[in-house]
Structure formats: structure tokens, C-alpha cells
Image (cartoon, grey):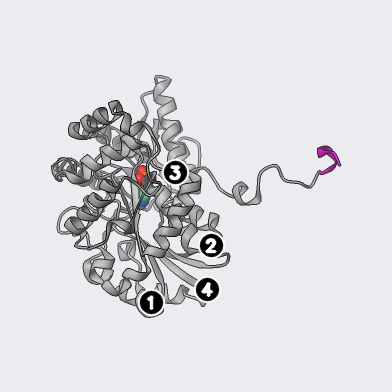
Amino acid sequence: MTAASQPTQRRVSTRLASITESATLAVDAKAKALAAAGRPVIGFGAGEPDFPTPDYVVEAAVVAARDPRWHRYTPAGGLPELRQAIAAKTLRDSGLAVDPSQVLVTNGGKQALFNAFAALLDPGDEVLLPSPYWTTYPESIRLAGGEPVVVPTDESTGYLVPIDRLEAARTPATKALVFVSPSNPTGAVYPPEQVEAIGRWAVDRGLWVVTDEIYEHLVYGDARFSSMPTLVPELADRCVVVNGVAKTYAMTGWRVGWLIGPPDVVKAATNLQSHSTSNVANVSQVAALAAVSGDLSAVGVMRQAFDRRRLAMVDMLNAVPGFSCPEPLGAFYCYPAVHGALDRDIRGRTPTTSAELAALILDEVEVAVVPGEAFGTPGYLRLSYALGDTDLVEGVGRIQRLLSEE
Ligand SMILES: Cc1ncc(COP(=O)(O)O)c(C=O)c1O
């Protein structure tokens, strides 16, 4: 039989055909392309610090690149000294004692999530996913054969999910809960009592928790980060912690993250990684080793700048007609509700969705923002405040002026 006589055969698998491009990366790429073409575009799309990686981290990588020892394959699970340092850092920052063998070093937090869901989920397993959610969770759950079950939250509860809503979404097929605090895209930070209550609920129901702690050091005001398995030690046997160096050390491009979990899950995920990507680039691992073994002064400097920009941005967004923005307490995003800015004429166009509004803002005033559709909640926009103060004021100012036009 010739290929031409098999018209029903798909070229791209059903599994991958259903995956969409990361909307946040797409917005960022569009803004960067416009800027490269000389347009005065201001991008609020990126989920990355605008600071360079600290010098001592870069220096460690330069030295490593020259050392032939790092020019070869290394263990798939990560450099032993890095796994050790991650275990020590986890005890220092989260109060969670783990053995280095429970750490798997991955290509960023993203691969940690893909590995975790691949290790945990069978076809049909349901995963509770509070929304607004970061755009990669549903795709990584689905690719592993699982079914994301969205549990909506909104600004009325500060984007925190009440336990009764989790309980209402639970079925006999529920295997796990995704928990992320501080949150991307909302900047919400759960108070410790609520982290503990959700952890206890998961233990009582026999559920797994995949908890994403990548923004642990970016909290503001009175907000405090708390790690669920530290507050609920009984959860340790059913908990996977995801983390990485990207946000804390301005290292998004180096691609180093990790997962921490019970030995059987870490072993399964390591086996998968041994076939998919092998070890993370050694130079990056040595850089990550310098980062996590060092102090937290670099993130302290970034946090101060983000805090200042956060307060400026939230004030400016609340002054945009039709926007309503709760104060974010963590990460580096504002997540205003924009329902009040829809369904009215703006320069001859009438956006009816946040996706249309984001497109209009980009076309008319060259400001890139990510629509809430990317996070499972139409009617919102995400703006990162990890960009320079002047650009921030200019960019939100352009939106303000556009939406104030009669
Ligand atoms: C909530 C959350 N988790 C994980 C990641 C993954 O980060 P990386 O793969 O760069 O380590 C991100 C990046 O935007 C994120 O926002």
C-alpha cells in the first residue's frame, strides 16, 4: 500500500495536535520581533526577571566550560554535588529535610512538571487545577494521559481556592492537586493556615500534591512563603515539589530546575529523563550549584525593585477605566479583571474578549500583554512587572490613555 492510499492516517499525532503553543512565549516573541523591527513596543508578556544572572554564577560557568571534566555525559539525575546542594537549600529555605537521592535535576521547572505528571498519571486520572492557572499545567497533565479538572477562583477570594470548591470538584478518579503559591499568573500567596488546611485535606483524601515553589523568594509586604510538605509532613509520601533557579537567580535561559519527591516517583522520573534528555547541560548545572550554594542577596535586590514596581503598577492599573486589580503579594505579575473595558468602542473596534482587547492594545499602542484566555480565565490580562520602571510607567500609561479616550 502506498502512502497516498492511506488518506486517513494523521501526519501529526492526535496527542500533539491538541497542544497549543505557549501563549506567554508567543506574546513575548511577537513583542521582541516588533522591537527588533524598530517599533517602540513595550512588552509585559515575559515571565522572567530583567536582571542579569549574578556575576559569581556566570564566573562558575565560565570556569566549568573550560574544564574537560564537564565536556562529557554525567548522571541523568543530576550532578551529585548539585543534588546535595539542592537538598541543603531546601532545608534552609523551606525547612524541609530531604535526601539528595530524592532530588532530580531537570531542564527547568517545566521539565520537572512534565516528568512529575508522567510519573504519576495513568489515562483517565484527574488532576485538580485551580484557575487562573499557568498555561503549561493543563498541557503537561494531558500529555501524560491525565485530565485537568479546572477549579475556578476569582479576584473576590484573592484568587485563592477554598477547600469546599476543591472538594466539590473531587471524584473517585481524582489523583492529584496542582498547588502553586506564589502564583503565576495572579501573584496570589496563600497564608500558611490555608496551605496547611489544603495539605491536610489532600492527606485525608489520599490525594497527591504537585506543589510548584518556583517563586518562593518573591513575596512582598506581610506575605510569607510556606512549603506545604513542611507544614504537613504526612504529605511527604504523596508530594512532588517543583522548583528551579530561573526566577530566584535571574537564570531563565540556563534551564535548570528540579523536582523533589518520594523515592519511587523520583526513580521513575529519572528513568524517563535518562531516555529523553539525559543530564542537564553540565555548565548550567555548575552555575546552578554556585547559585543555590550562595546567599540570597541577589534575589533580595531584585525583590526590592519588583516590590516598588508592583505598587506602581497596581495603582496605575486600577486607574484604567474598566480595570480592577487586586494587589499581588508574590511573583512578578499583576492580573487585572478587565470585563469593564470590553464591549465598547475603542478607536472603531469593539473588543468582546480579553484576547481581542490584548490584540487591540498591541495594534494601537504597541504594548504587549497576555490575555486571560491563556490561563483559563477569559476577562483578565496578565502584565509582568519584571521590566524597567520607565518602561512600566510608559506602557501602562499608554493603556490608560487608550482606554480613557471618549
Ligand atoms: C509557575 C511556574 N512554574 C514553573 C515555571 C518554569 O520555569 P523554568 O522552566 O524556566 O524553570 C514557570 C516559568 O514561567 C512558572 O511561572
* Mark sitting earlier along the chain (2/3): 2
Vertical comparison of 340 with 63: above or below = below
Q: Which residue is mark 3?
A: 278
User: How many C-alpha atoms fall within 10 Å of the one at disc 1: few (<14), some, or many (≥20)?
Assistant: few
CA distance separating discs 2 and 3: 24 Å
Q: Nearer the viewer, mark 2 or mark 1?
A: 2
Q: Nearer the viewer, mark 3 or mark 1?
A: 3
Quarter that holds the C terminus: top left
Instruction: Tell me the element at label 3.
Output: loop
Ligand 1 neighbours mark 3 (CB distance < 8 Å): no
| Amino acid type of the residue that numbered disc 1 sits on in the rendered structure | Asp
Vertical comparison of 288 with 217: above or below = above
Give the residue displayed 42% in from the left and 62% down from the top.
Answer: 265
| Amino acid type of the residue that numbered disc 4 sits on in the rendered structure | Ala
Image spot of residue 177 (x, y percent): 41, 66
Task: Provide the residue span drawn in magenta.
Answer: 1-6
Q: Which residue is mark 2?
A: 146
Extreme residue in the front direction = 69
Q: Which residue is mark 4?
A: 173
Camera-nearest residue between 2 and 18: 2
| Amino acid type of the residue that numbered disc 2 sits on in the rendered structure | Gly
* Mark sitting earlier along the chain (2/1): 2
Camera-nearest residue between 336 and 83: 83
Q: Is residue 304 left or right of residue 13?
A: left
Q: Nearer the viewer, mark 3 or mark 4?
A: 3
